[in-house]
Image (cartoon, grey):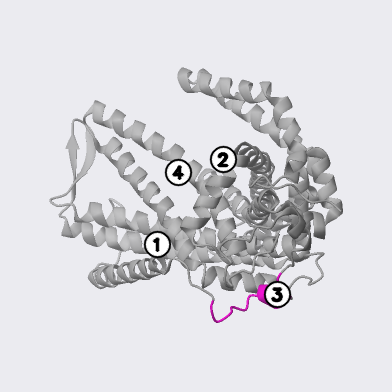
């Protein structure tokens, strides 16, 4: 079967050969995969790119208006006590010990994340099995805790779910070896192409910068439109509620949440498409006569930000709309005095939450098709649906098993980072805070350390997750290429998982 040409003519659907033709089907020339677009390369889903740019323009215009209205209303960083004393609201003061804590925390969390990444490479089988049992233990423990705290219904649901998964352990165990091979391959490719980690770090920095801008913008716009809507806090049967004369503030908050959801999804999916493109290059060209291109990461990033960017915007928009609708329903549930309406809103929000989770998985596979074949999003979605109908159970099981490994890594790194923050404060006893504030400082530092650990571990986790998804999709679509370019890996996988010798169209691998 022909390898994807990543943006050339006919790249939206890989050609299909008969068994005799498939053995001799040529891979495309190396220069077609080096991230250099031909003159005929198409930009897919351009309308979604236009809508994204229009949304950025509207967001910018709204901020310009609100910032101008806010500039004469700067908040006072002091509070005034009853005796007239002005006291600064800052808990921390910056000194060398705080700087040491910040820098050492970054180094420690990075070292822990890298250490877990090495652990995945060397003890993959053990981690897949152990993380599966660990996830069952957590589910059962959560259920027992819920029962003890009075949440009987959800407690029994958690316990039954944990026992059901444990009862089906043999079924899960039969699929574990495939996840082991795929995860090992993803780790090896990440080591071969460290640019994938650089892409993940870049996405992380962009997300932090965007979140900072969004938080600041939301605070300014909330202040401005609170005055425009003449909002005030009123007491309603002992319950404080914000009451406004018009809905301007409410619509602004909804819009800001939509912008946050959409842009966050776009950043995440650009990173995923970029990394998937690199793994696609490895799958189709590593071991082939043509060899791999010189800069697969740069070429893949270029495709993700140009010809495939519209498809990224399109798929991300669908998730953002679901998230926004769920936010509206949650707001109605919290603000409603009608018990029936609040219950219906809660049920609808729960349904949307389930749909959102399923669609997130679907999108991940669809964007892999976009990355490997340069397909428009709708066509990628159709082909993903065909793949899920044929290999859906295996896809979900593989995704869950790998997710357990990465999730356990995030939890471990987060807890270890939090422990480091506690030990630093206890042993060094820095001077950047008042001893009277020690309990709250300990809580804040440990919380921030945990968040830092999760964020740092998300970098290798996102790369491995994208790599695992891409490898699974490529195996399902075209096992023939793996047999031709990496026969040893093919035999190792097919020995444990014979189904990969047949692709999603029912075509068997033609062996020599």
Calculate the distance from the C-alpha at mark 1 to the C-alpha at mark 3.
34 Å
Residue lying at 39% horizontally and 60% vertically, measured from the top left: 215
CB-based contact (under 8 Å), mark 2 and mark 1: no
- Please indicate whether residue 492 sits to the left or right of residue 106 in the image: right
| Residue highlighted by disc 3 | 295
Calculate the distance from the C-alpha at mark 2 to the C-alpha at mark 1.
39 Å
Q: Report the span colored magenta.
A: 28-40
Residue 145 in magenta stretch: no
Instruction: Kindly give the residue lying farthest to the bottom in the view shown.
Output: 39
| Residue highlighted by disc 1 | 214
Mark linked to residue 13 = none
Residue lying at 68% horizontally and 43% vertically, measured from the top left: 402
Residue lying at 77% horizontally and 39% vertically, measured from the top left: 498
User: For mark 4, does the 10 Å Cα neighbourhood hold few (<14), some (14 to 19), or many (20 or more) residues?
Assistant: some
Up-down relation of residue 332 to residue 287 (above or below): above
Give percent across and percent down for residue 355: 44, 40
């Amino acid at each position: 079967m022909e390898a994807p040409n990543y943006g050339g003519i006919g790249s939206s659907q890989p050609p299909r050969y008969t068994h005799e033709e498939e053995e001799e089907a040529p891979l495309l020339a190396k220069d077609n995969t080096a991230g250099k677009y031909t003159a005929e390369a198409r930009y897919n889903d351009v309308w979604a790119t236009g809508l994204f740019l229009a949304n950025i323009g509207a967001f910018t215009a709204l901020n310009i208006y609100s910032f101008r209205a806010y500039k004469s209303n700067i908040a006072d960083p002091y509070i005034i006590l009853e005796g007239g004393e002005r006291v600064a609201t800052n808990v921390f003061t910056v000194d060398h010990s705080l700087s040491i804590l910040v820098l050492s925390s970054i180094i420690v969390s990075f070292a822990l994340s890298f250490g877990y990444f090495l652990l995945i490479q060397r003890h993959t089988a053990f981690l897949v099995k152990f993380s599966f049992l660990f996830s069952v233990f957590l589910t059962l423990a959560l259920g027992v805790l819920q029962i003890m705290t009075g949440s009987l219904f959800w407690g029994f649901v958690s316990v039954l779910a944990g026992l059901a998964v444990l009862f089906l352990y043999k079924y899960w165990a039969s699929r574990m070896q495939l996840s082991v091979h795929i995860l090992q391959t993803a780790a090896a490719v990440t080591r071969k192409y460290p640019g994938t980690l650089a892409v993940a770090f870049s996405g992380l920095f962009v997300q932090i910068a965007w979140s900072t801008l969004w938080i600041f913008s939301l605070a300014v716009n909330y202040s401005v439109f609170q005055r425009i809507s003449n909002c005030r806090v009123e007491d309603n049967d002992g319950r404080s509620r914000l009451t406004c004369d018009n809905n301007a503030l409410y619509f602004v908050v909804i819009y800001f949440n939509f912008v946050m959801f959409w842009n966050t999804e776009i950043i995440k999916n650009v990173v995923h498409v970029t990394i998937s493109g690199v793994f696609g290059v490895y799958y189709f060209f590593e071991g082939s006569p043509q060899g791999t291109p010189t800069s697969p990461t740069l070429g893949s990033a270029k495709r993700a930000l140009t010809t495939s960017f519209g498809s990224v915007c399109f798929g991300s928009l669908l998730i953002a709309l679901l998230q926004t609708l769920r936010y509206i329903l949650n707001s109605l549930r919290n603000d409603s005095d009608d018990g029936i309406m609040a219950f219906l809103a809660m049920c609808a929000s729960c349904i949307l939450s389930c749909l959102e989770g399923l669609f997130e998985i679907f999108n991940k596979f669809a964007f892999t098709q976009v990355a490997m074949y340069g397909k428009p999003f709708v066509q990628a979605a159709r082909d993903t649906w065909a793949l899920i109908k044929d290999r859906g159970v295996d896809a979900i099981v593989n995704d869950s098993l790998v997710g357990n490994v990465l999730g356990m890594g995030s939890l471990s790194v987060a807890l270890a980072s939090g422990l480091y923050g506690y030990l630093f404060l206890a042993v060094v006893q820095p001077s950047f805070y008042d001893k009277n504030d020690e309990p709250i400082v300990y809580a804040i530092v440990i919380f921030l350390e945990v968040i830092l650990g999760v964020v740092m571990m998300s970098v290798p986790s996102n790369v491995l997750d994208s790599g695992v998804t891409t490898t699974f999709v490529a195996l399902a679509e075209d096992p023939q290429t793996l047999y031709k370019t990496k026969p040893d890996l093919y035999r190792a996988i097919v020995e444990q998982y014979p189904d990969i010798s047949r692709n999603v169209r029912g075509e068997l691998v033609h062996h020599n």
